[in-house]
Image (cartoon, coloured by chain):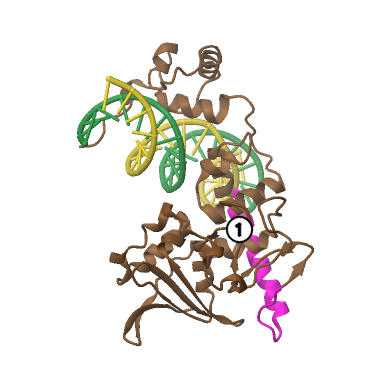
Chain colours: A brown, B yellow, C green
Amino acid sequence: MGRAPCCDKANVKRGPWSPEEDAKLKSYIEEHGTGGNWIALPQKIGLKRCGKSCRLRWLNYLRPNIKHGGFSEEEDNIICSLYVNIGSRWSIIAAQLPGRTDNDIKNYWNTKLKKKLLGKQRKEHHAQARRAGGLKQEIKRESGDMMLPVGVISRTPHWSYEQNSWPIPLANAYSHLNNQTSSIVHIPDSTVTAIMNSQYSSFDISLTQDQLYPSTVNTITTDTCHTSNVFQGFGSFSSDLACVDPQHIDGSEGLFYGSTNTTSTESTSWGDISSLVSHYEACQQRILPQEVTFEGSSYFAMQT
DNA sequence: AAATCGACCAACCGCCTTTTG
DNA sequence: GCAAAAGGCGGTTGGTCGATT
C-alpha cells in the first residue's frame, strides 16, 4: 500500500499561481513565517493549494533575493564543474550560487548549458583532430589554466576534505579508463585495481575500500566483485561520486596532473571549460565491460 | 494567415530522508 | 524501535510563446 497523499487532490487548485495567491502566501509568510508546517499553511491562509505547492512557490519565486535568468559565465562554469563532479545534485549546486534555485539551475542546465557544453566539445574534437598530425595527444600548460590529456586523472578543486588532500572523483577515473587504448580493471575483494596502459605509461591503481569515501563505498561489495554487475557499480559512481584521496594511494603522484602552483582549494581557477567536457561526456557513458579470464582470474575489460 | 516545431520554464509527481509522536 | 507525517529532492510533464515553414 502506498503512502497517503499529502492533501486532498480533488479539493486543491493546480496549475499556475495567480497574483492574488502569490500575494496571500507572501504576506502571510513574511508576517508569520511558515510555522514549520507547510501542509497546514494553505488552510490557515485560505488558499486552496497543496502545502508542497506552497513551499515550492515560496522557495522558487516568492522568497526575497531570488534571481531569475541572466546566468553569468562564471555561474556557467561553476554549474558545469559541479555537475561534472557531483552530478545532478541541484540543491547542492544551487547552494553555491546565491539567489539561484535548484529548479532554475536544473532548467537552465537541461535547456541551455548541456547543449553549450556539448557544442564546445564538438569544437574541441575538431580542433584536436586538426592538431593531431603525428601526435595523438598533447599536454598543454598555459598560465595556470589546465588542460587534461586523456588518460590522466584530474584533481578536482572541490570536495576538499583537508588542505593538500584532494579527493579524486572515481567517476573521472572511470571515464578515463574508457579512453585508454587498453584497460583492464579488476576488483577483487575489498580492492579496486585499475591497470591502465596509456600512451604515457602503464600504471596500476589499487584502492582499498577505505580509500573510497564512505558515501558510496557500499556500491562495491564483495558480492558484486565477481559478477558482471561490478561495472554497473562502477558506472554508478558517475552520479554518486566515489572519491579517492591521492595521498593514500601509493606511487600515485605521477598519475595526477594539474596546475602545479595550486595545492589547495584556495584561488583555484575553474579551469578551461573544455577540460570538463570529456568528463561530462564520459560520465554519460555506461559502457559495460566484457568479462575475460587472465592468469586464472576474472577481469572486466573495456573495449575502447 | 495558419500550422508546425522547438525552446523554455513553472509546476507537478513520486520517491527518499528526516522528524515526530 | 516503529510507523506516520512532513520535508526535500530530482525527474518529468505540459502550457506558452516565438520562430519557421
Q: Position of residue A122 (x, y in %)?
A: 64, 67
Q: Which of A213 and A230 is in front in this view?
A: A213
Q: Which residue is drawn at 57% across and 28% down?
A: A61
Amino acid type indicated by mark 1: Thr
Q: Position of residue A94 (x, y in %)?
A: 57, 40
Residue stretch rendered in magenta on the structure:
A112-139
Specify whether residue A14 is in view: no
Q: Is residue C17 above or below residue B20?
A: below
Q: Which of A242 and A86 is in front in this view?
A: A242
Q: In this view, does C18 lie above or below A237?
A: above
Q: Which residue is drawn at 57% across and 48% down?
A: A109
Residue linked to disc 1: A156
Q: What chain letter is assigned to the residue under label 1?
A: A
Instruction: Name the image quarter holding residue A49.
Output: top left
Specify whether residue A259 is in view: yes
Q: Does the segment drawn in magenta span residue A290?
A: no
In the image: residue A123, left or right of residue B4: right
The outermost residue toward the right is A143
